[in-house]
Amino acid sequence: MPQANASIQTDHPIYASDLLRMPAVVRHTGLSRSTIYRLMAIRHFPVPVKLARRAVGWRKSDVDQWSRTLPPVPP
């Protein structure tokens, strides 16, 4: 399973209102934690932003953009 060192650091401002921690990403996407890490490993899911030594978060805007690229679910 990928570790937090897979995260990226950025010079752009990060606002707390735009960050999702893992439980929120699971709720937001409907994916399991292991599926999120598996998709990250094959570069099919946004990379988290390093928040602290042992904390990462995903930008909600990145997760929303990722979800818009998914094919529609058939009825």
Image (spheres, rainbow, N blue to C red):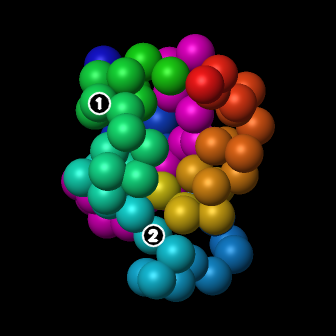
Locate residue 71, reporting x and y percent.
73, 27
Most extreme residue toward the front is: 75
User: Real-space Cα distance between discs 2 and 1?
Assistant: 18 Å
Q: Is residue 1 left or right of residue 39?
A: left
Three-letter residue code for mark 1: Ser
Disc 2 element:
strand
What residue is rendered at 29% in x and 30% in y?
32
Mark 2 against mark 1, which lies toward the viewer?
1
Can see residue 65? yes
Q: Is residue 55 left or right of residue 39?
A: left
Question: In terms of image quadrants, where is residue 26?
Answer: top left
Region in magenta: 40-55
Can see residue 8? no
Relative to 1, does residue 68 appear above or below in the rendering?
below
Of the 4 image quadrants, the one containing the N terminus is top left
Locate residue 6, reporting x and y percent.
47, 36
Three-letter residue code for mark 2: Leu
Relative to 57, does residue 18 appear above or below in the rendering?
below
Of the 4 image quadrants, the one containing the C terminus is top right
Q: Which residue is mark 1?
A: 32
Q: Is residue 43 magenta?
A: yes
Tag of residue 19? 2
